[in-house]
Image (cartoon, grey):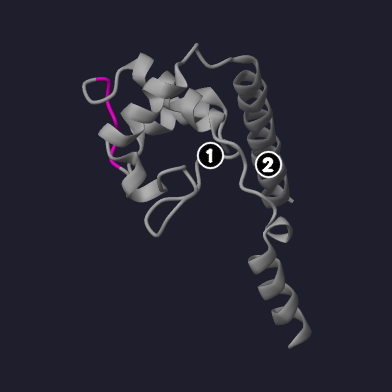
């Protein structure tokens, strides 16, 4: 009985914290950024080496554009404090304005076209699905 109570209390607290952070994230807009400057910073700081030139993702880094998977407060905190494979980009490396510019650049990248609109890819997918 006690284990069930502790589990339920912990689960409730986790849901409450997630909901509060999601609400905060959705209410905190990104600062104004310049997409052209953001592209230059994206290239200068080497983001493209792991995330691809258009933020499409690569072998080392996940997709970060089209659409941008993180709200501004989450992305900015992650970029500054990450402890994983990606090095943290402190304000000495990337100023707050430069980070806002990178975010604007990532948001400006149009989504990739649906593969069905590209004849070669559509044909390949159609052929592959009929050979199963």
Q: Which of 63 and 75 is in front in this view?
A: 63
| Range of residues picked out in magenta | 87-91
Residue 77 in view: yes
| Residue at the farthest bottom position | 131
C-alpha span from label 2 to label 1: 32 Å
* Nearer to the camera, 35 or 119: 119
**Principal SS element in the magenta part?**
loop
Q: Earlier in the sequence, mark 2 or mark 1?
A: 2
Task: Check residue 11 in the rendering and tell me which mark sits there, or answer none.
Answer: 2
Tell me if residue 31 is in the magenta stretch.
no
Q: List x then y, in percent, for residue 1.
A: 74, 51
Apparent side of residue 108 relative to residue 51 in the rendered image (left or right):
right
Secondary element at image label 1: loop
Q: Which residue is found at the position 59% from the left and 15% from the top? A: 28
Q: Which of 102 and 35 is in front in this view?
A: 35
Q: In this view, does 82 lie to the left or right of 14?
A: left
Q: Is residue 40 left or right of residue 120?
A: left
The quadrant of the picture occupied by the C terminus is bottom right
Q: Which residue is drawn at 73% across and 60% down?
A: 116
Say what secondary structure mark 2 lies in.
helix
Residue at the left extreme of this rendering: 92
Task: Determine crowd level at label 2: few under 14, some 14-19, many 20+ residues with C-alpha closer than 10 A.
Answer: few
Task: Report if residue 80 is visible in the image.
Answer: no
Percent coordinates x, y for residue 29 in the rendering? 58, 15
Q: Which residue is drawn at 60% across and 37% down?
A: 110
Q: Mark 1 highlights which residue? A: 65
The residue lying at 29 percent from left, 31 percent from top is: 89
Rendered location of residue 5, percent (x, y): 72, 44
Q: What percent of the width, then of the height, locates residue 35? A: 46, 22
Task: Give residue 91's quadrant in the image.
Answer: top left
> Which residue lies most toward the top here?
32
């Amino acid at each position: 009985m006690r284990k069930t109570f502790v589990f339920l209390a912990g689960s409730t607290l986790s849901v409450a914290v997630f909901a509060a952070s999601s609400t905060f994230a959705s209410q905190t807009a990104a600062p104004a950024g310049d997409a052209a400057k953001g592209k230059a910073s994206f290239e200068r700081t080497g983001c493209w080496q792991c995330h691809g030139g258009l933020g499409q993702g690569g072998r080392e880094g996940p997709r970060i554009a089209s659409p941008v998977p993180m709200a501004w407060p989450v992305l900015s905190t992650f970029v500054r404090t990450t402890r994983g494979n990606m090095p943290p980009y402190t304000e000495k490396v990337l100023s707050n304005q430069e980070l806002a510019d990178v975010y604007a650049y990532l948001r400006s990248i149009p989504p990739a076209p649906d593969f069905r609109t590209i004849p070669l890819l559509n044909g390949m997918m159609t052929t592959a699905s009929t050979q199963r």
